[in-house]
Image (cartoon, rainbow, N blue to C red):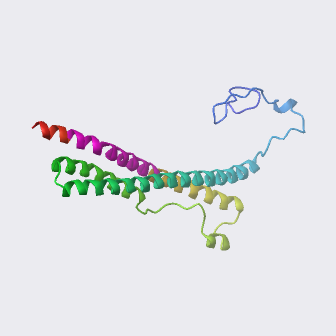
Amino acid sequence: MNNSFGAGDMSGPSGLQATERAPSESNRPDDIEVGQMGPDLLYWSTKEAVRQAEAKIKSQSEALAGIMTRATTLLGWTVTASLALAAALVAEKEVAAVVLTATCTVASAICAIAVIWPREWGTASWEIEWFLNPPYETELQFLDAMARGAAKRIKEDQEKIEQCAHLLRLAYLFLVLSPIVGAVAVFGFSRA
């Protein structure tokens, strides 16, 4: 991508094409705001990196909360299904089918518990002590450290969120499979 004004592809990070080209440096009026340039651009971009990191951490927190809520609800359903299966087992109805169905339900519950099990997550804030006794000499160094630390936490948390989402999909799969496995077992054992 060519980032010079007036030449080349002007598509941004979203992939959208600019409909107008900015004036070249030589014929641009002095009253057009072009934003930060030179050394100031580094300071602005570092502040923007911190702002974007805060937004990403908030988005991850919301996604995680949704995953945890669904896992907790799913766990409730597995408990309900397990109680019904226990009653069927006590009544000695289709014992093999009940055991196979219960196996799927228990596997679903285990996956749901694994999702909601406490983990160490990155936080959306920094230690207060860090601000009271600054380890850096400039605001730019401070912001750079914050942005780099947040980027590391975001990456680590994203991997954990993806693991939780995978476990949640497995939990749903096992719960959906449990009545299917039970039905196949009932029909399979009744024919034998």
Whether the magenta-drawn stretch holds residue 162 is answered as yes
Observer-nearest of 97 and 165: 97
- Where does the N terminus fall, quadrant-wise? top right
User: Where does the image place residue 80, in percent across and percent down from the top left?
Assistant: 34, 56
Q: Which residues are magenta?
A: 161-184
Relative to 71, is 28 above or below?
above
Quadrant in which residue 150 is drawn: bottom right
- Where does the C terminus fall, quadrant-wise? top left
Quadrant in which residue 177 is drawn: top left
Q: How many marks?
A: 0
Residue drawn 27% across the image and 49% down it: 104
Whether the magenta-drawn stretch holds residue 38 is answered as no
User: Where does the image place residue 154, in percent across and percent down from the top left?
Assistant: 53, 53
Tell me the chief SS of the magenta region.
helix
Name the side, left or right, on which 131 lies relative to 30.
Answer: left
User: Where does the image place residue 114, in percent across and percent down from the top left?
Assistant: 37, 57
Relative to 174, is 8 above or below?
above
User: Where does the image place residue 82, in percent across and percent down from the top left?
Assistant: 29, 55
Observer-nearest of 50 and 39: 50
Relative to 163, is 14 above or below?
above
Residue drawn 18% across the image and 55% down it: 91
